[in-house]
Amino acid sequence: MQLNVTSVVNATTVSFIELDQATKKMYQKAYAKDPAYKKIWKTGHASSDYEVQEGLIYLKSEGTVRRLCVPNHRKLRLDVIHNIHDAAHPGVRRTQLAAAQWYFWVTMDIDVKAYVQSCEACMRYKSNTRRKSGKLQPIPIPTACWEVVSTDFITHLPVSDGFDAIMVVVDKLSMRPVCIPTHTTATAEDTAKLFFNNVIRHYGIPSTIISDRDPKFTSKFWKALVSLMKIKAAMTTAHRAQADGQTERQNRTLEDSLRCSISYHGNDWNEYLPMIEYAHATLVSTSSKLSPFFVYTGRQPRNPLLPGGNAEHLTQSRVEHASRFVQQRQQVIERARKNLQDAQEAQKKFYDRRRAEHPFRVGDLALLSTQDLNISHATAETTLRSRKFVPRFIGPHTIQELHGNVAMLDLPANMKILVNASALTSSKWITASLIGSRAESFQVNASDLRRRWGAAARD
């Protein structure tokens, strides 16, 4: 559709949209069928709201521009929005304002919004300004110490006594850390031995181990081991460090403590590790309001710097002392759990203020963010090999499984990953009535896409 602006000079200069003959005939045929404009077009007489110029109906206004009335014809309205939006891909409001300068129909704002929100280029390449999906789902608080533990690694440290990494294990109730020197190249079998010798040997077999998707924890050996020991292996989603925020924070705090203690060369961190671990175990946690040592043992560690070394004197009978000890242990555990519950609720309230419930269901189409994807995967739908102009989203892909905030998408076999709902954006609106025909062009040829993904994986 070719558009021109012409000026008709009367008492004042008034601007009209001028159409090519083919498009003008489409408008006139549509006017004849549209109840809103049928009478005006047939009589050719102006009214208080409309005027007719060369067989086209315009809405009167106080300004010098007469807005062309677009009849209820899907293609005509789609062409108008297409010409305005697809030149520079402005957002919804700017497209609405641009269209309203020259055109008019009652549902214009609704149709423009549907069109812009279904624009494939905008969905793929523009930033998603909506609130991220997926509210916080806190891990249930354990009922006993060392029932649930989380583990992570600090790797690629300066070599100290032959070690260049630290395995950090944290009890989810007491927050007590266990810091184990190890190697960045440690295998799943090495890690299992360290876990048994430093955790299970002292604290028993946990019911659940929370970890990331490090190859050590996804290996067949590790899976077989935890299965034999009846341990549930709970793994966080890729690129979601906050899913196990407790261990991540412990790692940051441990690294900060080491930075403050080690020498200039940093190759003596292993000497300070036991002292730093002990110090962290005796410091009061901001979440539980108790020290990890106190939650686990029911007493404060002896401090020789205090008068009398805060030693307790046994003035009761052994039975009374045992009874009092059990009662105190129960009170300490309940107090720690209550404080952790309060801290979790506060964290959830703060986190959820910037989040929305994800709108996804199994079977929905969703676009996947390329932010954390390998460059070959992120550019598989283009000929680009640089991240600078890579689409912000790829897809759409069908959601096959959905567990809380974690989704499994219908992705190629070489990229079977679990993704968090915050990495997805919905494309459900592509079936809007006005733009139904656009859905066809938006569908990705699955076999062609898989072929391209496979080629990217081989590059």
Image (spheres, grey):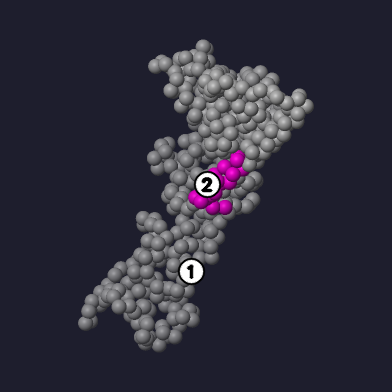
Place of residue 299 in the rendered image (x, y in percent of width and height, measured from the top left): 64, 27
According to the picture, the residue beneath numbered tag 2 turns out to be 351
Left or right? Give the position of 278 relative to 127. right
Q: Residue furthest top?
A: 161
- Locate the N terminus by quadrant: bottom left
What amino acid does circle 2 point to? Answer: Tyr
Identify the residue at image location x=41%, y=37%.
Answer: 386
Name the disc covering residue 74, or none.
1
Q: CA distance from mark 1 to mark 2?
A: 43 Å
Q: Residue furthest right?
A: 319
Q: Which residues are magenta?
A: 339-357
Q: Earlier in the sequence, mark 1 or mark 2?
A: 1
Q: Nearer the viewer, residue 196 or 363?
A: 196
Identify the residue at image location x=64%, y=45%.
Answer: 403
Which SS type dominates the magenta stretch? helix
Q: Nearer the viewer, mark 1 or mark 2?
A: 2
Can I make out residue 216 in this image? yes
Q: What is the crowding at mark 1: few (fewer than 14 residues within 10 Å), some, or many (at least 20)?
A: few
Q: Secondary structure at mark 2?
A: helix
- Assess whether residue 351 is covered by the magenta stretch: yes
What amino acid does circle 1 point to? Answer: Arg
Quadrant in which residue 285 is drawn: top right
- Assess whether residue 328 is covered by the magenta stretch: no
Left or right? Give the position of 423 relative to 121. right
Left or right? Give the position of 42 relative to 6. right
Place of residue 379 in the rendered image (x, y in percent of width and height, measured from the top left): 47, 40
Could you tell me if the residues under marks 1 and 2 are in contact, i.e. CB atoms within 8 Å?
no
